[in-house]
Amino acid sequence: SANTLVVEGRPHMSNLFYQTKAPRPTLARAEGIYMWDTSGKRYIDGSSGAMVSNIGHSNPAVLAAMRAQMDKSTFGYRLHFQTDASEALADKVASLTPKGLDRVFFVSGGSEAVESTLKLARQYALTQGQAQRTKVISRYPSYHGSTLGALAITGYAPMTAPFDPMMHAMPKIPAPRAYLDGLDPTDTATGLHYANMLEAKILEEGPATILAFIVEPIGGASTGALVPPAGYMQRIRQICDQYGVLLIHDEVMTGGGRTGRFFGADHWDVTPDIIALSKGFGAGYVPLGAMIARNDIVEAVMNGDGFIHGYTYAGNPLACAAGLAVLNEIEQHSLTENAAQMGDALKTRLEAIMQRYPVIGDVRGKGLLLAFELMADRATKEPLPAAFNAHSRLVDIAYDNGLIIYSRRTRGGIAGDHFLVCPPMIVTEPQLDEITDILDQSMQQLMA
Ligand code: PMP
């Protein structure tokens, strides 16, 4: 049956349940950009898991740092002890953020990081005598996490619909979708067109009720690496300033160098008030996330009631030691720069594949946050029929061929199939050829 695994040669019912109905092969080991299952089959990790394993698997420096920390301590409750590991990581994070954004709160993942930003924003508004500011505007499509607060600001119906009645209904605006709307993404008029939807929404809701606006600098899973048009991020910042709305960047997927800059927003030189970071921060070694906030916001809250927030594992020393080693590896091996270079090289290869398959309607992204989208018609942008099931079939074909990619069906509010191709930032040119050869072959099988 669907949940039957073979363990040590015998059928075994899995007691775990995840979204997929059929179990995947069992992971035996992983190294660099490669993973092996227990039958010995090798896979290229072409999506770094879910854009997580940014520095590759089994990095010796990270493993050594974890072992060294394990010999000292693996847990010290943050209200009982400071730890060298969490202090050192907070300093390192602050050295990577814009000046004035130096205050860090560690958590265990992306959803927790996003939840934390919402609560800090709320507590800050209270210190400013703005108790009526309760609404967080977000975008659709968007993905901000699995917990109910993060879901309330997520614009992705397949994940939110069953829970709608349990969440605060939060206002949302469309994410820019220039390629679908026939607008030129390099024209700042396009950026203004979409950004001004935020101003319209603020005015519609009443500016005095808006706490924050949250945005993924480059759309992740929900839009498939959709890069905002020229001028968009800057105009968003202006609008937030004008109405006293806090600007939160969800850098859970874009943070950590994958886009070719340490933070995705660095491409536009825009500084948010609060940042959520995770995924490539723990890089698959440990569950780790962070909220990074403007110093004066944190001081106002800490001088008032203090930050009313929990998370038992926040600042866990083992996680922090691993996180510090990850950031050091990124720096010492110029992995952000490699992501920029290899990203350009991979994008060129994906564009070459697009020439061979008319069904590929768009190739997009920055650095190694790249995606392509399948369409029935490049001119009209009509999606493939849902029944063709391209998003799951191509992933399965590639998986059989030894390449892992990540897909979703949704785009700009319209159903469509997109695929993220996001190998670890240590990837080399010959490995890019391996990836694109398998992808090409898999496309051929899909369309046969
Ligand atoms: N925000 C963004 C932009 C994400 O991509 C994700 C995960 N896909 C999350 C938040 C939630 O992170 P986690 O799954 O680690 O809770």
Image (tube, rainbow, N blue to C red):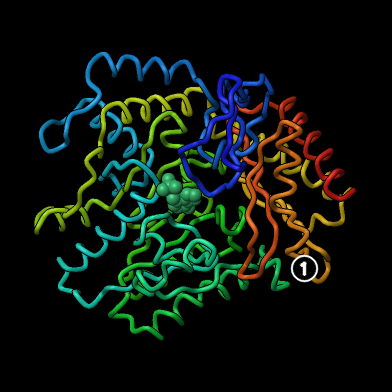
User: Residue at position x 70%, y 36% from top?
Assistant: 399
Depth check: give the residue in front, 326 or 260.
326
Judge whether residue 251 can be spotted in this image. Answer: no
User: Residue at position x 70%, y 53% from top?
Assistant: 391
User: Residue at position x 36%, y 61% from top?
Assistant: 148
Q: Can you give x and y, in whole percent of width and height, for residue 309 in the image?
A: 20, 52
Q: Is residue 220 above or below residue 14?
A: below
User: Residue at position x 66%, y 64% from top?
Assistant: 185
Quadrant in which the N terminus is drawn: top right
Q: Can you give x and y, in whole percent of width and height, for residue 431 in the image?
A: 71, 27
Q: Can you give x and y, in whole percent of width and height, for residue 372 in the image?
A: 72, 51
Q: Is residue 48 above or below residue 9?
A: below
Question: In terms of image quadrants, where is residue 428?
Answer: top right
Residue placed under numbered mark 1 in the picture: 381
Q: Can you give x and y, in whole percent of width and height, for residue 295 in the image?
A: 23, 51
Q: Is residue 381 above or below residue 39?
A: below
Q: Amino acid at mark 1?
A: Lys
Depth check: give the residue in front, 119 or 384.
384
Question: In terms of image quadrants, where is residue 318?
Answer: top left
99 left or right, relative to 443: left
Circle 1 — which element?
A: loop
412 left or right, relative to 57: right
